[in-house]
Image: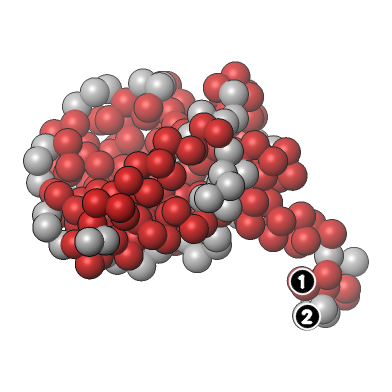
Amino acid sequence: SEQREHDPRYWCTADFVEQRNLAASLAYRGHIKESAEVAGTYFSGWFQAMVPEGAMLGTVQAEVADSTFADWLEREEFAPSVMTHALWWWASRSDTSAVLRYIERGGDEPIGRSALALARGDTTEAILLFEDVKTSWVHTNLTVLTRAKLLESQGRDAEALDVLQARFLNDWPLASRVLWIVERARLADRLGQTETALRDYEFVTRVWADADPELQPVVEEAEAAVARLDK
């Protein structure tokens, strides 16, 4: 009831809150499949990152992701902050129609245009358009990661590292936080910032020690880097 929802205790004990917390914690620890099962395809500002991140990591089937996002995109109550998470999935699959529909329905146009350029394979244009994106929590950790990787693909490692030195856009313990730290470690390593690289690689080895098999190559990479750098 509305009265119950105004009770602060409700937001700590409600079933959907417990479900949300469990799903986020599982994702953070690299149990993406289980996280996605717990979260389901629930459409909410709390759960919106679960399926897109799982899809990008290859632990949520592409068919499931496509179907889920198509349903979300056509909901009567369009929520740009929720749909932003799916933009980078569409861009990775060159799905220009979905990105254009996101913009048409009132999504954030600067970020939508960046995703559209990427979906069309125009990396240079995507990087330029990112200059107009005013990042905030609604733009997701995946937005920042995408921008950093685009800069990295152009050999602009120092700029990419600067992007990832900022605070996380989403403070929830999600898989994207660990991916952010992995990428920051790689960049710092290449740029000779050993202390930063070692700290971040060690973090990954701890947090994803028991992660899904699909993520174990990342853990192995981090473990090898720690052994190399910690001398």
Callout 1 amino acid: Trp
Callout 2 amino acid: Pro
- Residue at 43% over, 28% down: 90
Give the residue at the far bottom of this rendering: 8
Q: Which mark is residue 11?
A: 1
Instruction: Give percent across and percent down for residue 87.
Output: 43, 37
Are the residues at dot 1 and dot 2 in contact (C-beta closer than 8 Å)?
A: yes
Which quadrant: the C terminus? bottom left
Q: Circle 1 — which element? A: helix
Q: In which quarter of the image is residue 50?
A: top right
Instruction: Give percent across and percent down for residue 154.
Output: 11, 37
Instruction: Give percent across and percent down for residue 16.
Output: 79, 57
Which quadrant: the N terminus? bottom right
Tell me if 75 is positioned left or right of 120 in this view. right
Q: Residues within 10 Å of mark 1 (few under 14, many from 20)?
A: some
Mark yes or no: residue 214 visible: yes
Q: Distance between the residues labelled 1 and 2?
A: 6 Å
Closer to the camera in the image, 152 or 69: 152
Give the residue at the far front of this rendering: 231
Q: Name the residue under label 2.
A: 8
